[in-house]
Image (tube, coloured by chain):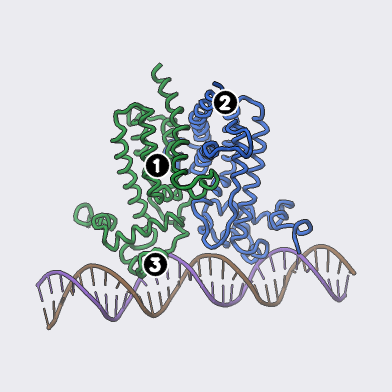
Chain colours: A green, B blue, C brown, D purple
Amino acid sequence: MGKGILMATPLEKARRDPNSMKAKILASARKIFSKNGFSGTTTRMIAKAVGIDISTLYYHWGEKADLYNAVLMDTQEELRQELKRIEKIIHGKPLPNRLEIAINESCDYLFQNPEITNLILLNYFTKPKGKDITEFHFIDIITGIAISMGLAMDKDKITKQAKARVMAVMLSLFNFIAGKKFLSPIIGAECRDYLDVVKETLNFILIPAFMQEKKINES
Amino acid sequence: MGKGILMATPLEKARRDPNSMKAKILASARKIFSKNGFSGTTTRMIAKAVGIDISTLYYHWGEKADLYNAVLMDTQEELRQELKRIEKIIHGKPLPNRLEIAINESCDYLFQNPEITNLILLNYFTKPKGKDITEFHFIDIITGIAISMGLAMDKDKITKQAKARVMAVMLSLFNFIAGKKFLSPIIGAECRDYLDVVKETLNFILIPAFMQEKKINES
DNA sequence: TAATCTCTCCATCAATTGATGCAAACAAAT
DNA sequence: ATTTGTTTGCATCAATTGATGGAGAGATTA
């Protein structure tokens, strides 16, 4: 009965065939959950967006929380792949360049996939009660980044401070993306303009911070 | 019929008498909305927390969205007062001190009132559809801070960049507070320890950024 | 062709939710 | 004491929501 090798999870099936009904539902669910949160989303909304009956949705994904979990895991995996891609690009370059490129690349990516940041952030402000929902596994992601940024040498010897600094970077980034709709009228910039201001602001704030660290390390 | 002077809004009445039923409901509503968001909260939850029947709640506050609006406006006003208080403290001091004190004070305050950041952040990730909900009036708040930080001279001549930088500061702060439950296990610090790490991280990131700005201005 | 398997929708359920009418309790004013 | 106005809870409603059973369509296999 072990589904280790023979059985494929619904999520695996969906990823295998992007044209399948499972995949279509998953894609619509991501959009709608990211916009309305878990409790603000109804299974009927998703089914309507796909153009199917809710019972078809339940047939493929089981209960609402299961679908939500699948969306979270799918999103998480995608983000992880993207971070790996960025890490490859910046590998070996000097620190300030690394930071600038990483900011640039991740801004572009997240800007084109705003559901990702929305889902992640929404998932810690509100959690469906009673259901156990997948946690984002940030710990290994940020340890990777911390090492890549020279904040730690060893995977097991990362200080609280280093982790907090990496989280600060990610949070700044995520919030400018997820809060776009809210922030762009405040800042007074739209679309591409907004994206440019965000990149500049992140560079302004992050580069001096992590350069000071380097100076201390060098001395 | 104009309620300009003679009529008091429910919110004004609630503030006038903190022991009134209106005030009790408002306080409970704040807690519960901030934890579950608008659609994750039911009027029955709030009524139960106060120990009253839902019809009593409706009698005092009208429909759910009205109560939610009152909570947002109340919270906003409270935050505004607090920021004024902090500004008085830091007024006249040199920039790095100002920043450090402001970070320290606002961290302490928001940490003890975590509902505030939760409500603000939740309110831009998800908005109840169909209802018009109060927007937080950040524009005047951040222009005030921008001037106080020396990022702008005139109230009307604030660049997009300056506004974005102030927002970056607030977002970093808000997220460390609102995301505490999520972040503290990742960072590996609890309670007071977490608070200290957050303060240190914010200082680490923000002070160098805004000091570089000052150096450019001075030269 | 017959049998089996996969997928889809219609009809329906029970529970929850926002919201209201109404009568009783209570206090204040006459 | 009687009237008036305010507050509160019980009972109830209609709409929404998560979820399921079962019948039928369609393809695949025997």
Residue drawn where x is 56% and y is 59% of the image: B45
- Is residue A7 something one can see in this rendering? yes
Residue of label 3: A48
Q: Which x, y percent locates residue B129?
A: 51, 61
Q: Which x, y percent locates residue A154?
A: 32, 28
Residue drawn where x is 66% and y is 38% of the image: B84
Does A55 appear above or below A32? below
Residue projecting furthest to the top: A219
The quadrant in which residue A131 appears is: bottom left
Q: Which label is found at residue A107?
A: 1
Q: Amino acid at mark 1?
A: Cys
Q: To which chain does the residue with label 3 belong?
A: A
- Is residue A179 something one can see in this rendering? no
Q: How many marks?
A: 3
Q: Nearer the viewer, mark 1 or mark 3?
A: 1
Residue drawn where x is 57% and y is 59% of the image: B132
